[in-house]
Image (cartoon, grey):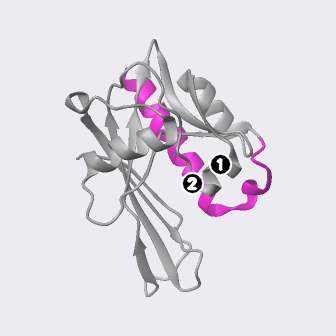
């Protein structure tokens, strides 16, 4: 898969222990809008998707995560690669480096919504599926007040990652 970009805070020591967390993200377009997960509590947008669990492959994770976070059913025959973003920064635990390869896939979904099955933190953040124009999501991620997450480097880099991928998609569509 092609490398779209690398976001490296360089806020860690090369000797720190690396913690790897690969994830997949769905790019779902409908009538010029993209299916995005909106955190109502912290006012940011992210692509549906999350971390790969155990021995799951990318496609299995993508289908599972889109169903859980967005309540949408992916049509597996429509899945195609877009690109990968590597995020590197100091981990939450002292002496660690967080390395996350985010694999983005275009896909289509069946009509209808099966309902979300959110983790506790996702429910607490008010994760909501919205179809939005990419420009709106970029503007929200860059300029909205994200509350207590404004000072959280992990969230800040994740939010910026999504804004940059959105800009890349806008330039290519």
Q: Do the residues labelled 2 and 1 touch (CB within 8 Å)?
A: yes
Mark drawn on residue 97: none
Which image quarter: residue 165? top left
The residue at 39%/37% (across/down) is 26
The residue at 41%/22% (across/down) is 29
The residue at 53%/33% (across/down) is 36
x, y percent for residue 64 = 37, 45
Task: Decide whether residue 149 is among the magenta residues.
Answer: yes
Pick the residue in front: 132 or 126: 126
x, y percent for residue 27 = 40, 32
Query: Relative to residue 124, is residue 55 depicted above or below?
Result: below
The residue at 54%/74% (across/down) is 91
Task: Decide whether residue 35 is among the magenta residues.
Answer: no
The residue where tag 2 is placed is 119
Q: Give the residues drawn in magenta, as a range.
A: 145-173
The residue where tag 1 is placed is 123
Disc 2 residue crowd, few under 14, some 14–19, many 20+, Cα 10 Å:
few
Element on which disc 1 rests: helix
Which image quarter: residue 130? top right
Pick the residue in front: 80 or 108: 108
Element on which disc 2 rests: loop
Which image quarter: residue 14? bottom left
x, y percent for residue 45 = 60, 38
Query: Relative to residue 50, is residue 18 depicted above or below?
Result: below
């Amino acid at each position: 898969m092609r490398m779209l970009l690398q976001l490296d805070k360089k806020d860690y020591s090369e000797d720190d222990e690396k913690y790897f967390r690969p994830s997949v993200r769905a790019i779902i377009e409908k009538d010029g809008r993209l299916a995005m997960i909106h955190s109502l509590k912290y006012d940011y947008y992210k692509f549906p998707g999350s971390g790969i669990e155990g021995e799951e492959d990318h496609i299995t994770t993508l289908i599972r995560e889109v169903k859980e976070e967005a309540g949408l059913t992916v049509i597996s025959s429509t899945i195609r690669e877009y690109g990968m973003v590597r995020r590197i920064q100091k981990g939450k635990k002292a002496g660690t480096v967080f390395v996350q390869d985010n694999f983005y896939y275009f896909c289509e979904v069946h009509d209808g919504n099966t309902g979300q099955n959110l983790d506790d933190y996702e429910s607490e953040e008010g994760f909501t599926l919205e179809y939005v124009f990419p420009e709106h999501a970029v503007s929200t991620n860059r300029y909205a007040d994200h509350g207590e997450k404004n000072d959280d480097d992990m969230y800040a880099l994740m939010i910026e990652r999504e804004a940059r991928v959105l800009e890349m998609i806008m330039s290519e569509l």
